[in-house]
């Protein structure tokens, strides 16, 4: 595990880059869903365009970014002396990461339903859901930076 300590700044940098890419997708995909549900006629060329954009965002950007976030994050967790699990902040951070991961998979299910034409969620609900990653991110950042407990 000493090699993790040697490469700590690089692993942390890659972790932050991965988080930024993942969060960009978590913010943008629900917005695409809002416009897709409110302004696009099923079966139209625009419907196919939205489906392609949503698919590519999820599969090409968000999935690899989430995977990289987890890999580099776990590498940081296993770096000796970095995380003290006897305090509260790492547990809250872990819960926020699990929440973001659940939200990511929920978005994936919604994308499949939109593609199949069976999505029953309104644009208003997608607008509301668009706030979920923001709330989780705010809590996560305060846990990591301020470490309140």
Image (cartoon, rainbow, N blue to C red):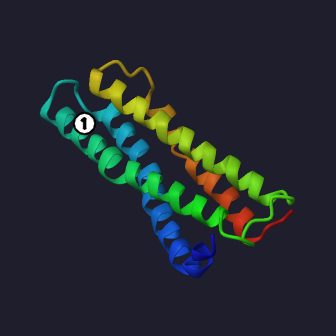
Q: Residue furthest left?
A: 45
Report the residue at 67% width, 58% height from top: 140
Q: Which image quarter is the N terminus in?
A: bottom right
**Left or right: 146, with 127 as reference point:** right
Report the residue at 77% width, 70% height from top: 146
User: Could you tell me residue 54's position as x and y percent?
Assistant: 30, 42
Question: Can residue 145 be seen at all in this image of the molecule?
Answer: yes
User: Could you tell me residue 107's position as x and y percent?
Assistant: 44, 37
Give 65 or 142, whichever is nearer the viewer: 65
Determine crowd level at label 1: few under 14, some 14-19, many 20+ residues with C-alpha closer than 10 A.
Answer: many
For residue 144, what is the image quadrant? Answer: bottom right
Report the residue at 65% width, 63% height from top: 78
Question: Can residue 126 be seen at all in this image of the molecule?
Answer: no
Counting labels gives 1
User: Could you tell me residue 116's position as x and y percent?
Assistant: 28, 21
For residue 45, what is the image quadrant? Answer: top left
Is 47 rendered above or below residue 113?
A: below
Q: Which image quarter is the C terminus in?
A: bottom right
**Left or right: 137, with 57 as reference point:** right
Is 17 rendered above or below residue 95?
A: below
User: Could you tell me residue 27's position as x and y percent?
Assistant: 46, 52
Report the residue at 74% width, 62% height from top: 143
Residue assigned mark 1: 51
Task: Determine whether the residue tagged by mark 1 lies in a helix, strand or loop.
Answer: helix
């Amino acid at each position: 595990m000493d090699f993790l300590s040697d490469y700590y700044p690089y692993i942390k940098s890659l972790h932050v880059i991965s988080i930024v890419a993942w969060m960009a997708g978590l913010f943008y995909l629900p917005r695409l869903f809002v416009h897709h549900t409110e302004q696009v006629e099923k079966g139209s060329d625009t419907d196919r365009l939205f489906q392609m954009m949503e698919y590519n965002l999820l599969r090409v950007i968000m999935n690899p970014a989430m995977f990289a976030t987890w890999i580099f994050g776990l590498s940081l967790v296993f770096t000796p002396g970095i995380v003290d699990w006897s305090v509260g902040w790492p547990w809250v951070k872990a819960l926020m990461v699990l929440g973001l991961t659940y939200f990511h998979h929920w978005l994936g299910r919604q994308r499949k339903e939109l593609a199949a034409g069976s999505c029953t969620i309104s644009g208003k609900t997608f607008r509301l859901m668009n706030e979920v990653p923001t709330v989780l991110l705010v809590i996560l950042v305060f846990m990591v930076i301020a470490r309140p407990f």
